[in-house]
Image (cartoon, rainbow, N blue to C red):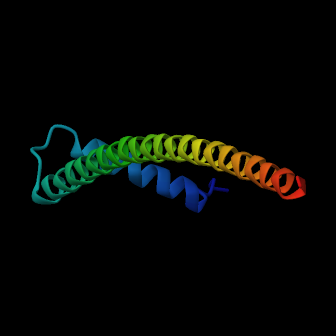
Amino acid sequence: MKPKLKPLGWLAAACAAFALAACGKPEGPAEKIGRSIDEAVQKAGEKLEQAGDAIERRAKAAGEAVESAAQKTGEAVSKAVEKTGQAIEKTGEKIQDAAKDARRP
């Protein structure tokens, strides 16, 4: 009885045969196209990575600008609240003084 080769075995044998047949041969048009495609894909990947880095830097800068503006706004609001409180206090004092004057005969 002869040993039978399974389909996976045939595939491995065929790949090995093609690999051996390709050794030492000059690069053909299909190989050149394949190499060009590989290079183009790699360059595109590098460009995408560069674009991602640029987006990240700009997003960080924008976040810092928003944070700075929010802090300045918070400080301005705090000052406005402080001044409003002082104005209300002065108004209250004037009302009390006016009430005292109104009670005097």
Where does residue 57 sit, x and y in percent of width and height? 37, 41
Q: Residue furthest toward the front? A: 105
If the image is split into quadrants, where does the C terminus sit?
bottom right
Q: Which residue is at 61% across, 45% downward?
A: 83
Left/right of residue 15 with respect to residue 100 in the rendered view: left
Q: Which residue is at 16% across, 37% downward?
A: 24
Left/right of residue 5 with respect to residue 95 in the rendered view: left
Q: Which residue is at 41% across, 47% downward?
A: 62
Q: Nearer the viewer, residue 5 or 60?
A: 60
The answer to which image quadrant residue 98 occupies is: bottom right
If the image is split into quadrants, where does the N terminus sit?
bottom right
The answer to which image quadrant residue 34 occupies is: bottom left
Q: Nearer the viewer, residue 75 or 89?
A: 89
The answer to which image quadrant residue 86 occupies is: top right
Q: Is residue 54 above or below residue 7?
A: above
Q: Nearer the viewer, residue 81 or 20?
A: 81
- Number of numbered tags placed on the structure image: 0
Q: Which residue is at 41% across, 44% downward?
A: 56
Where does residue 94 sit, x and y in percent of width and height? 73, 50
Where does residue 43 sit, x and y in percent of width and height? 23, 47
Where does residue 51 sit, x and y in percent of width and height? 30, 49
